[in-house]
Amino acid sequence: MEKTVNIFLYGKKYAVPENLTIMGAMEYAGYQLVRGCGCRNGFCGACATIYRIKGDRELKVCLACQTKVEENMYIATLPFFPLVKAVYDIEKVSPTEQIMMQLYPEIYSCIGCNACTKACTQSLNVMQYIAYAQRGEYEKCAEESFDCVMCGVCSSRCPAGISHPQVAMLARRLNGKYLAPGCGHLEDRVKEIRDGTFRELMESLMQKPLEELKELYNNREIEK
Amino acid sequence: MYTEKMLESMAKVAANREANAAMEPRRMTAEEKEKLLATYHPDYIESQFATLSVGPNKGEKVPLELRALLEANSRVKDMEIDLEKPFYDVDVLVIGGGGAGSSAAIEAHEKGANVMIVTKLRIGDANTMMAEGGIQAADKPNDSPAIHYVDALGGGHFANKPELLYRLVTEAPEAILWLNKLGVEFDKMPDGTMVTTHGGGTSRKRMHAAKDYSGAEIMRTLRDEVLNRGIPVVDFTAAIELILDEEGKAAGAVLQNMETGEILVARAKTVILATGGCGRLHYQGFPTSNHYGATADGLILGYRAGAKLLYQDTLQYHPTGAAFPEQIFGALVTEKVRSLGAMLINVDGTPFMHPLETRDVSAASIIRECKERGKGVPTPQGEGIWLDTPMIEMKGGEGTIEKRIPAMMRMFGKYGIDIRKEPIVIYPTLHYQNGGLEIAADNETGVPGLYVAGEAVGGIHGRNRLMGNSLLDIIVFGRSAGKNAADRAKDVKLGKLTLRHVESFAKEMEEAGIKSDIVSPKLLPDYARKA
């Protein structure tokens, strides 16, 4: 018989096998999930969860699919959080400080409480990336926020009403499009293809009989 | 946490690491690969397949679990649905909110079409979000679309539809450029040169990546763009049946709210199926790396409407699913781990294959090492093979893992495993639907006005897909589906809407003597424990 622990889903007690994740435990308890369940692998941020261990003052956060249950865990899921998503035209914005002031002015109301960082399910330094965004340092903001899964827990804890994941999203797009170096060999290749450089080669390749294609494949040179 | 036997074996792996890292196991010959696949690949286990009795692919082989859904009852059976008063009326209806659906919606919108996305979970709840390793494109001077073509063709066992593969490889650089211009970040050198690596079966280093969040980075950017454009996204709403007009053209879909059950009709001049894969059907009892909604819905919808399937009998088992600890059983361990230098090592600490064979060959080889040769590493849940991650730091220098595969480091770190210091245990996991609905080069199925993009398409990858060609195909074929569906919508005059095809399919089933007690599409797996 596998060992069980007692957990409390929205306050209701269930005994579940100790090796389960919170998501697995909910299903073990009989929940057919629709909300609060996405990739089940820690990438999509659908299963943001808040919990407290009985007797402990600290409120903890996690992704339900990536966290094992513990004895006396009081669990509430946060399947949706109303983040503010500013709408903009990526072709018309530029990577200046002004764009943040215009689209997400609330970031300048940050009081430095660091609740966002403590709440991050990915253990990111959220307050730091917001600081980078305030200063228009989008490359740093992009790097610091890169592993964000946009679960929204940080924003749920923010007294200034900042939608951190959306701020970081904007910073990454600005960095990816405008600040990171362009790629010469990529642009050259796109141009060659548009100019039809490979057309003849491709057509002759596609007309080759199967046996010849197999020969080509089985004897092709593989880059070290 | 590890068992004693695992620790014992792990010590052997560590002891041999330096010697192992210095060697490159030889690649298998074509004959060896063929024999290996026929003996150990799950696609070759005849008893796991059945023959279809109805529909456009009658007489052909499908996995048992898929047949059960193809030859099942419609969810609209016995429902009174008024098709004359659609709740939504659009030019282009995109079913599915992953990478293909989002790319399609963006391009349809760019063409000026009134386009809408409907998705049964949220936009971005898709396998795209979970694709870790990267995206292929032949954009380096030593590479060309022709070399990419040969790699993918050989990897696909020469079964790829040439006209689709041609488009995949020749439009690949353009796809990367498009993403980059949308603001997708790629790993680059300071001068802008793309950092590229090998994937299994590639002959040039053409894997572009954004750390090991490649798919997530692409998906969140596409989602942001969809929202910036104000394209309506109707989430938590499933398409449960396609609607045709009286001439047999695609004309919309019956939708159902996943939470309230409310039925709504969407009329559309063209429809794009971008519903993704099937991992959550757990073929042959395999765990899966797929997201929660991967239940092959689009295949069911399309098939009932008369669209043909292609290579529906071929699945991809990713060689490296997590086999330990049990909390992440089946989760994807990106192929990039091997691209960066980690080798596959058996219980004795011995490498038994080249780490970058194609996925089907690698999976079969791992299964053989465990089942035939008895060289698997025993785990509490079964067995697996070591993937020697510390080798990456040995080859690439300290810090390589944190910089290049942070998601992997985090995933195992949560369970107290430091992949920089300890190897991990892996076993094949159900990963990708190689087959799907058959399309022409313009994404259209045999049903006029019904387009398909993404994993729901069959034929692009033949009978086995290479790493990095899926993120690529969702962009290339997602974009063209959107453009072509939007263009077509301009000239379409819809007749009266009908669900007659659903009734005829049911009648065909009855005539074939098939009785089913299940309904499809499945929409979500049923993991809730029953008391």
Image (tube, coloured by chain):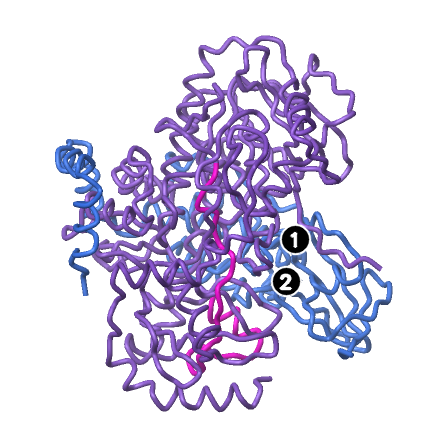
Q: Residue at x 48, y 73 (%)?
A: B371
Q: At label 1, which amino acid type do we have?
A: Cys
Name the residue beneath numbered marker 2. Answer: A65
Position of the C terminus of chain B by quadrant: bottom right
Magenta-drawn segment: B407-436
Seen at 55% across and 30% down, the residue is B302
Query: Per the image, is B434 magenta?
Result: yes
Q: Amino acid at mark 2?
A: Cys
Cα distance in 3D space between marks 1 and 2 = 8 Å
Query: Relative to B223, is B251 above or below?
Result: above
Is B486 rendered above or below residue B208?
above
Per the image, the residue denoted by label 1 is A37
In the structure shown, which secondary structural element does the residue marked by tag 1 occupy? loop
On the question of residue B77 being in view, the answer is: yes
Label 2's element?
helix
Chain that is coloured purple in the picture: B
Instruction: Name the chain letter of the residue that bears numbered label 1.
Output: A
Task: Looking at the picture, tell me which residue is in the foreground, A74 or B362.
Answer: B362
**Coordinates of residue B92 in the picture (x, y in percent):** 51, 23
Q: Earlier in the sequence, mark 1 or mark 2?
A: 1
Dot 1 and dot 2 residues touching (CB under 8 Å):
yes
